Image (cartoon, helix red, strand yellow):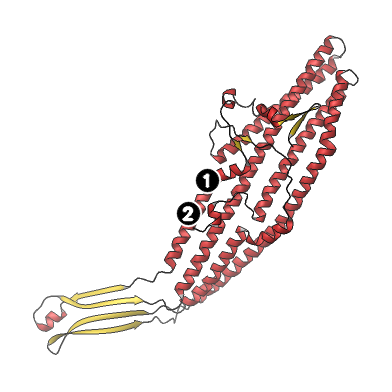
Amino acid sequence: MNTLYLGCRKISWAALVGFVLSAAVPMSVLAQPQDVWTLEDSIQRVLEIAPEIRAAQAMISARQGALQQAGAWPNPQIELRADDRIGKDEGTGGTSFTRFAFSQPLPLSGRLGQQRAIARAELEAARSARQYQHLRLETQVAQRYHSLQLMMESLRVAEQRLQLADEFQNIGHRREQAGELSRLERLRLDLIRESAQQMLDKAEGGTNEALSRFRAYLGLTSAAIPKLMPLEPFASMPVLEQLQTGLSEHPALLAARHRLDAARSGVSLVRAERLPDPTLRLFREQDFLNGRRQDVTGIEVVVTAPLWDRKAGRLSEAHAQVEQTQSKLQMLERDLASSMQQNYLHLNHLVEQAAHFLVRVLEPAEKVFVLTRKAYVSGELEILSLIDANNTYFDAHERYLELLQEAWLEAAELRLTAGRALVTTEQDTHHE
């Protein structure tokens, strides 16, 4: 909605921009330069400073290191032995090196390949989890943004309400002095004015609270008074079929599928580890044979016999992990599909309700209020009619703003359940 209703006139947002927080903050603060924050600007700001994104990025780096490590061969062993055995046999005494050996475990069971598969799947899961964290942050920013929008609009309406109440009160005083108004009716006008003051106080408090939450989340200074875009009707309804088609690429589902791949590779890893890797050993020894020193060179293959530990327990554990991960994936698919359907239906209902409310309630209430005000000023109607028209109009205006905010909040929830980001970053489109 591009205008606010005030009496028989429509006031533009630009004309009312000075009303924003005018009673809630000092004029010296309002005089400072103010930036206009769109929802996209706010999201981009949070994505740049949010510790959640840094933590998710650190997890990606950790998984990259794990992938690099997963393909590494086990380190070899080098043995050197020195003793006095040959010296004793020769009768010369002394100590000398008598053995050198080099041992290398041979990962022939396919264990390294399965370790790499697990690490690769966990890396992709971490990347998808970062994208899902991005979506969650977008939703949280939208909640704070639209809450502040509503409170700022409510503050504007409360300012209008008080301004008109002051006019009614002044009219009442003049008519009372002229003997055209009873003291009871004048007191009722005073009540209208005090009620409007209470509504303004409430709006100021709510605006300051919403502003504090918004500034804290975006890392703004306590003196910053950001301007927001006006709270307008949500007009661009997405196509449900497109949302349903794209649901399979939801970052939360992608992360769950990658975890399932990692769990399945874990089963293969346990099977590969049931046969231990053999160890190849090359050695060279020096001994005293036939009255002289002689070198002996040999090769050994050491194999562990899996007689007692055949990894049966670990294999059962790995199979259970696969089943658990698969069940979580199925639950997530079910819950996201159900939530998306509900969010879409609710958003569509709110959009239609707001449009209907504007035409059938707010605009007629504004017309009735204008006519009632004129009739009261001319002495054609009693004070009770003015009170009723005043309350009906401003209550309807507040409810209309609430419907607009509810629609935008529902749209944010729909983007989250559908996996649709409003702002795309370089990390979302490129793998590190």
Please give the residue where the numbered disc 1 appears in the rendered image: 48
Residue 37 in the image, given as x and y percentages of width and height = 61, 38
Q: Residue at x 26, y 77 (%)?
A: 101
Nearer to me, 101 or 238: 238
Q: Secondary structure at mark 2?
A: helix
Determine which residue is flagged by label 2.
Answer: 58
Is 263 left, or right, of 145 in this rendering?
A: left
- Residue 185 image-quadrant placement: top right
Vertical relation: 293 (above or below) 68 = below
Q: Is residue 36 above or below residue 64?
A: above
Amino acid type assigned to the residue bearing label 1 in the image: Glu
Using the image as rendered, state which of residue 51 and residue 16 is in the foreground: 16
Q: Is residue 4 left or right of residue 211?
A: right
Real-space CA distance between mark 1 and mark 2, rounded to the nearest whole angstrom: 15 Å
Give the crowd class for mark 2: few <14, some 14-19, many >=20 residues within 10 Å: some
Disc number lying in front (1 or 2) = 1
Quarter holding residue 194: top right
Q: Position of residue 308 (x, y in %)?
A: 45, 80
Residue type for callout 2:
Ala
The residue positioned farthest toward the bottom in the image shown: 290
- Residue occupying the point 50% across, 66% down: 120
Which SS class for mark 1?
helix
Q: Residue at x 74, y 39 (%)?
A: 402
**Relative vertical location of residue 415 with respect to residue 17 in this rendering, above or below:** below
Can residue 224 be seen at all in this image of the molecule? yes
Q: Residue 422 or 95: which is nearer the viewer?
A: 422
Which of the 4 image quarters holds residue 374?
Answer: top right
Percent across and percent down for residue 139 are 63, 47
Q: Position of residue 397 (x, y in %)?
A: 77, 34
C-beta proximity under 8 Å, tags 1 and 2:
no
Task: Please tell me which of labels 1 and 2 falls first in the chain.
Answer: 1
Can I make out residue 313 in this image? Answer: no
